[in-house]
Amino acid sequence: MRRTGNKQGVAIIVVLLVLTVMAVIAAGVVALGTGSLGLANAQAQGERAYYAAEAGLAITLNRLQADVNHAGSSEFLLVGASPSRDSFDTKVFRQGDAGFPAGVVGSEYRYILSEGRAQNDGFEIRATRRVGLLARVTQSMFSYAVFARNAVMIETGSQVDFYNSEGNPLPDGAHGHVATNSNTANSIKVETNSTVNGRAYTAPGVINPGGIIVDGTSNVVGGQITMPSPVNFKAVSLPVDPEGLDPTTGTDPLNPDAADVPYADLTVNTAAPPLPPGAYGDVVVEAGGILTLVPGGEYTFASLTVRDDSAIQLPNTVLPTSLYIKKTMAMLDGAVVNDSLKPPLLKVFVSQGPVGLKAKKGGVPTKGYYSVYAPDADVKLDEQGQLYGSVIGRSVTLESSSKVTYDMELQNSSGGAVNLQILSHDRY
């Protein structure tokens, strides 16, 4: 009996030892599995944070192409029509900003730092990743004081000059440049006591000075240059068709959800309340009327006529305002008053033209602080008109002692025609 009891005791001990070992092994397996699961989960969250950071880079690059002054943003990612749990925070650095890469010199460079965040349902941050990108602005919509696809004519005491609307120091040299994409002879004329305080550029295929005429009474301070390649200017794309319906389809081809009637014409002959942003037909400002724009708005007109000592006015603002015109713009006897005195904040886009800018009020020449983008329209500034900004047209004529003063700040302005060259892509 004692031997039997001893055997049973030993068996119990062995069983307990085996169970203990199995428990230890099981605990190890569970711990290993839990660790692997945690590692896999951490890797998945890290990947989510990385993709959120990359999405922030892509979104910021797109916004920089529309506005090189874009400073970055903090947003949740969108999945379909709803925001996800993950988010990003982007910052855009320029030369002189803390965080801008050392050794990179030039106001045309932008460095984007994007931090992606993976978050749980309570929006607690579980992982973060950071990526960076260095880009260079290679072309702005308004890189020249005057640009014409076909011909530039500066005549009868007219001038092209430059300044900086923010009061920043002006770089050395002459920067009120004029240019054309034409490669025919005499595509730029500077005649009869006229001056260009910048360079005159013609397209490839012209051996200058054959493409440029500067008579003995006139001067191009920066010299005559042949561009290495033509500049690509896109046609004006209207937000909506201000002339209403397509008679074939019964819809507005640029805005299918618009009302099925033509946009109403508008006449302003008093100091009327501010005009809401939107689309209008033929707009006439006359008899001393003042058409006041809403800062930050986007307007589309079928045509615009300003006459009889009238004015278009943009109140002092920091918000960029855009005016789209399908057909003609005729400043017969009136002014464009931009109270901010900053040309990057008011841009006029003309699809067809022609564009006439007399810039007078009460018979006295006025200063207009805005820019005109009309690559398919003929643009004419005359009767001592003064435009502070930039002019782009199919052809551009300055005559009768008119003046275009290029704002250097337009090189960094918005407009949707900025090209960015990506130079480096960093992952932290």
Image (spheres, rainbow, N blue to C red):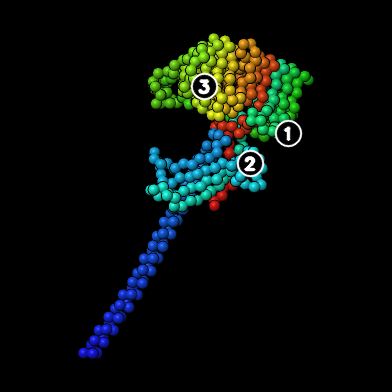
Q: Are marks 2 and 1 in contact (CB under 8 Å)?
A: no
Tag count in the figure? 3
* Quarter of the view holding residue 173: top right
What residue do we see at 38% from left, 64% from top? 33
Q: Secondary structure at mark 2?
A: loop
Q: Which amino acid type corresponds to the residue marked 2 in the rendered image? A: Gln
Question: Gap between marks 1 and 3, in whole Å?
Answer: 37 Å
**Label number found at residue 95:** 2
Say if residue 43 shows up in the picture: yes
- On screen, 393 above or below 285? below
Quarter holding the N terminus is bottom left
Amino acid type of the residue that numbered disc 3 sits on in the rendered structure: Leu
Name of the residue lying farthest toward the left: 1
User: In this rendering, which labeled residue sits more in front, label 2 or label 1?
Assistant: 2
Of badges 1 and 3, nearer the viewer stands 3
Q: Residues within 10 Å of mark 2 (few under 14, many from 20)?
A: some
Q: Give the quadrant of residue 37.
A: bottom left
Q: Which residue is mark 3?
A: 293
Q: Name the mark on residue 172.
A: 1
Q: Residue furthest bottom?
A: 2
Residue 308 pos. (x, y %): 57, 10
Query: Measured along the vertical axis of the image, is residue 63 above or below residue 133?
Result: above
